Amino acid sequence: MKTSTRSLLLIVLAAFVLRLALLIGVVHFPGIADPNHYYNLGVRLIQGHGLTLDYIWQYNDVYPTVEHPDDHWMPLTGIIAAAGMTVFGEGTFGAVLPFVVLGALLPLIAYAAARQFGVSNAGALWSAAAAALLPEFMLNSVRTDTTIPNALMIGLAVIAFTEGMRRGKVRYFVVSGIATGIAYAIRSESALVIPAAAASVIGYAVLERRSVPVRQAVIGMIAAGMCALALAIPWVLRNWSINGTLSTPTMNNMFFLTSHNDHYLFNTRLSLETMLAAMTPAQLIGRRLFELAATAKLAITTLDVLIVPVLGGALLLLATRDRTRLRTMLPAIILLIGFVIFYPILVPFKSQGGSMKKALLSLLPLFLPLAAFAFERAITDARMRAGAWLIALAIIGVNAVELVRQDDARNVTYLSVIETLRAAAVELPDQTGEGQLVFMSEDPFMLAYFGLSSVVFPMPDRDTAVEVAQRYAVDYLVMPSGRPALDALLNGGAEDARFVFVADVPNTHYQFWRIVSAEAGS
């Protein structure tokens, strides 16, 4: 076995051991919000309920009952969590362990990208170690979230495509297409890999200033597209059978969001008219400029101290006008541009919700070679360069462990509060006579984690809350709601005879309320 191969495998093993140690010794919960959702979906799968949920967290898609098919987010992350729990048992350890394994494989992507880019073997190994220790990668490796599997598949898709363009071999395009199809089943924006690859073919022709293997590229692109489509078809057909739509029933809503709270507008079709009624053109432009600035900040924070060498490597690449290296980076650069156009510009409020951050993290292993390139050009003495590399790795490694520790500490505090809430909730009588308690909550994900069915509080007013409560046979409201019209009842800012206080939840800020009559005056 080559020394470089042995070193790379040791990095992967060390990445796995560190993540496993954090999972065993630190992590108590699979993660708040999105990771919580995928964990819940995994539990539903291993319990034999299929791709369904027993809670409603948004109203852009209106479901007939609280229990419904999951069609809003892509399915594979929940399936990965279910696979882990099938083998290792239901719970955080079983659900998160597959993500620990996948996170430990990220160094392979960074190493392959660095070797393609043309840095030394030592630089490629350092890139692999950086991918193993970056704080956001460490944190998301101990969560049931989309970030890590998507980064693996996006990285593999781009690396295989680049290799296909270099060698003119269809098999590399096939691998790229398969990886793209899998990535689409994790995060839907991963479909942008296909147009980014097509744009890269044109870019190659411009950069080379001579003919590129057009015939092989066209055949390869067709093969990649067919492979990606074949993997996407089952999900598309499922949605068609459920909703009569290729994606979610109201996918176009996301283009007209003006606030994250628009997810909670009940039975409301968003459109250009509703968007312009809520915000002026100047405000819409300002929002997009803000999100572009926020994206730049995200790039800085996710790279931690490596932002300096990555930017330095990018500037060096431009200064040297190295066409070979630039061509290698081109697919990742074009895909990054595609993500920036899609999220901050086209759907800025999805960007605000964290989608842009996950898209950036999915591409990050492909940009780490720029940091290695900067180190190699800026520090010619091998021992000094090795020392600088070790210092950078030490800083991001310490930051990574601390990030996981702090995140878990917040999770445990919240977990204990909701556990207290659950203990009080199960003692309440069934108000609707449906044989099951259903709550209205600000966090249906967490209530589902503790086995409670719920629907999220709707926007904008109390009449809508009553309508939703009637539709889904809600027994109790878990207040406060995070909705001004409802929370005004708590502080005496409003009175409504339909809403009646039931009980405080001991040792928490929560209260149970119920709706007594839809006919009572507001």
Image (cartoon, helix red, strand yellow):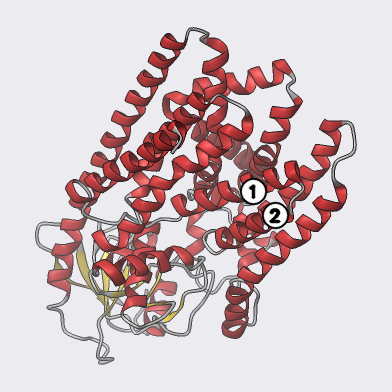
What residue do we see at 37% from left, 37% from top? 11
On residue 173, the disc is 2
Element assignment for label 1: helix
* Distance from Cα at disc 2 to Cα at disc 1: 6 Å
| Label 2, residues with CA under 10 Å away: few <14, some 14-19, many ≥20 | many
471 relative to 338 in the view: left or right: left
Q: How many marks?
A: 2
Residue 182 pos. (x, y %): 56, 62
Q: Is residue 270 among the parts visible in the rendering?
A: no
Residue under pointer 1: 160
Residue 461 pos. (x, y %): 43, 67
Q: Is residue 331 among the parts visible in the rendering?
A: yes
Mark found first going from the N terminus, 2 or 1: 1
Does the residue at mark 2 contact the one at mark 1 (Cβ under 8 Å)?
yes
Residue 329 pos. (x, y %): 67, 34
Q: Quarter of the image for the C terminus: give it.
A: bottom left
